[in-house]
Image: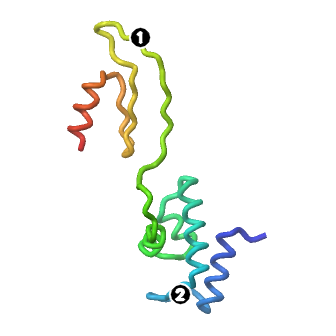
Amino acid sequence: MPTRVERFRNAASRYFGGRPGRGARYREDLRQEAVALARTGISEGKSLGRVSEELGIGPATLGRWLNRGDVSSPLRPVEVEREEVKEESGQASSLVVVTPSGWRIEGLHLEGIAKLLRALE
Protein backbone atom coordinates (compact mmCIF):
# COMPACT_ATOMS: atom_id res chain seq x y z
CA MET A 1 0.00 0.00 0.00
CA PRO A 2 1.49 3.36 -1.01
CA THR A 3 2.35 5.88 1.69
CA ARG A 4 0.87 9.39 1.77
CA VAL A 5 4.11 10.76 0.31
CA GLU A 6 3.97 8.26 -2.58
CA ARG A 7 0.30 9.07 -3.20
CA PHE A 8 1.17 12.80 -3.25
CA ARG A 9 4.05 12.27 -5.69
CA ASN A 10 1.82 10.12 -7.95
CA ALA A 11 -0.98 12.73 -7.91
CA ALA A 12 1.48 15.53 -8.71
CA SER A 13 3.06 13.46 -11.48
CA ARG A 14 -0.35 12.74 -13.04
CA TYR A 15 -1.32 16.42 -12.77
CA PHE A 16 1.85 17.65 -14.46
CA GLY A 17 2.27 14.72 -16.85
CA GLY A 18 5.62 13.92 -15.25
CA ARG A 19 7.87 16.01 -13.03
CA PRO A 20 6.75 19.64 -12.83
CA GLY A 21 8.97 22.19 -14.49
CA ARG A 22 10.24 25.45 -13.11
CA GLY A 23 7.39 27.84 -12.35
CA ALA A 24 4.75 25.09 -12.37
CA ARG A 25 1.65 25.97 -10.36
CA TYR A 26 0.32 23.28 -8.08
CA ARG A 27 -3.41 22.91 -7.50
CA GLU A 28 -4.59 24.11 -4.09
CA ASP A 29 -5.43 20.58 -2.92
CA LEU A 30 -1.89 19.41 -3.77
CA ARG A 31 -0.40 22.40 -1.95
CA GLN A 32 -2.50 21.68 1.13
CA GLU A 33 -1.49 18.02 1.12
CA ALA A 34 2.20 18.98 0.71
CA VAL A 35 1.93 21.39 3.67
CA ALA A 36 0.25 18.72 5.83
CA LEU A 37 2.94 16.17 4.92
CA ALA A 38 5.69 18.73 5.55
CA ARG A 39 4.33 19.64 8.99
CA THR A 40 4.12 15.96 9.89
CA GLY A 41 7.66 15.32 8.69
CA ILE A 42 9.07 18.35 10.49
CA SER A 43 7.29 17.40 13.72
CA GLU A 44 8.97 13.98 13.40
CA GLY A 45 12.36 15.73 13.30
CA LYS A 46 13.02 15.80 9.57
CA SER A 47 14.56 18.90 8.03
CA LEU A 48 12.70 21.04 5.52
CA GLY A 49 15.24 20.01 2.88
CA ARG A 50 14.66 16.32 3.55
CA VAL A 51 10.86 16.70 3.43
CA SER A 52 11.00 18.76 0.23
CA GLU A 53 13.25 16.14 -1.37
CA GLU A 54 10.80 13.36 -0.43
CA LEU A 55 7.90 15.34 -1.90
CA GLY A 56 9.77 16.44 -5.03
CA ILE A 57 9.19 20.14 -4.30
CA GLY A 58 11.89 22.79 -3.97
CA PRO A 59 12.66 23.73 -0.35
CA ALA A 60 12.06 27.45 -0.99
CA THR A 61 8.63 26.71 -2.47
CA LEU A 62 7.67 24.39 0.36
CA GLY A 63 8.92 26.92 2.91
CA ARG A 64 6.73 29.62 1.34
CA TRP A 65 3.72 27.33 1.42
CA LEU A 66 4.35 26.53 5.08
CA ASN A 67 4.56 30.21 6.00
CA ARG A 68 1.65 31.39 3.84
CA GLY A 69 -1.13 32.63 6.09
CA ASP A 70 0.68 31.31 9.14
CA VAL A 71 0.61 34.06 11.74
CA SER A 72 1.65 31.80 14.59
CA SER A 73 4.85 32.43 16.48
CA PRO A 74 8.04 30.72 15.31
CA LEU A 75 8.60 29.63 18.90
CA ARG A 76 8.37 25.95 19.78
CA PRO A 77 6.50 24.70 22.85
CA VAL A 78 8.68 23.67 25.78
CA GLU A 79 8.03 21.78 28.98
CA VAL A 80 9.05 23.43 32.22
CA GLU A 81 9.53 21.33 35.30
CA ARG A 82 9.87 22.85 38.72
CA GLU A 83 12.54 21.32 40.89
CA GLU A 84 13.31 22.25 44.44
CA VAL A 85 16.91 23.38 44.67
CA LYS A 86 18.87 23.44 47.89
CA GLU A 87 21.72 25.84 47.43
CA GLU A 88 24.57 25.97 49.84
CA SER A 89 26.95 28.89 49.78
CA GLY A 90 29.84 28.25 47.42
CA GLN A 91 27.97 25.48 45.57
CA ALA A 92 27.04 25.67 41.89
CA SER A 93 23.37 25.96 40.99
CA SER A 94 21.51 22.95 39.58
CA LEU A 95 19.55 25.27 37.27
CA VAL A 96 19.72 24.06 33.65
CA VAL A 97 18.73 26.21 30.65
CA VAL A 98 18.50 24.96 27.06
CA THR A 99 18.14 27.73 24.49
CA PRO A 100 16.14 27.33 21.24
CA SER A 101 19.43 27.28 19.31
CA GLY A 102 20.61 24.29 21.35
CA TRP A 103 22.91 25.84 23.95
CA ARG A 104 22.74 23.95 27.26
CA ILE A 105 23.81 25.97 30.29
CA GLU A 106 24.10 24.42 33.72
CA GLY A 107 25.98 24.94 36.94
CA LEU A 108 25.51 28.73 37.03
CA HIS A 109 23.31 30.94 39.15
CA LEU A 110 20.56 32.94 37.46
CA GLU A 111 22.69 36.10 37.18
CA GLY A 112 25.51 34.17 35.51
CA ILE A 113 23.13 32.54 33.04
CA ALA A 114 21.63 35.90 32.10
CA LYS A 115 25.09 37.38 31.55
CA LEU A 116 26.17 34.44 29.41
CA LEU A 117 23.01 34.51 27.27
CA ARG A 118 23.49 38.25 26.64
CA ALA A 119 27.05 37.54 25.50
CA LEU A 120 25.84 34.79 23.10
CA GLU A 121 23.24 37.01 21.38
- The residue positioned 25% from the left and 25% from the top of the image is 111
Looking at the figure, which quarter contains the C terminus?
Answer: top left
Query: Three-letter amino acid code at disc 1?
Result: Lys
Q: Quadrant of residue 41?
A: bottom right
Looking at marks 2 and 1 on the same chain, the residue that comes earlier in the sequence is marked by: 2
- The residue positioned 51% from the left and 64% from the top of the image is 50
Residue 89 on image: x %, y %: 30, 7
The residues bearing labels 2 and 1 have C-alpha atoms spaced at a distance of: 62 Å
Residue 46's place in the image compared with 24, above or below, is above
SS for callout 1: loop
Residue 109: give its label. Answer: none
Identify the residue position indicated by label 1 in the image: 86
Residue 33 on image: x %, y %: 61, 73
Looking at the figure, which quarter contains the N terminus?
Answer: bottom right
Front position in the image: 72 or 10: 72
Q: Say whether residue 85 is left or right of residue 43.
A: left
Residue 76 on image: x %, y %: 46, 49
Residue 17's place in the image compared with 54, above or below, is below
Front position in the image: 17 or 110: 110
Identify the residue position indicated by label 2 in the image: 20
Residue 107's place in the image compared with 118, above or below, is above
Q: Say whether residue 12 is left or right of residue 42.
A: right
Residue 36 on image: x %, y %: 59, 66
SS for callout 2: loop
Q: Quadrant of residue 103?
A: top left
- The residue positioned 57% from the left and 69% from the top of the image is 54
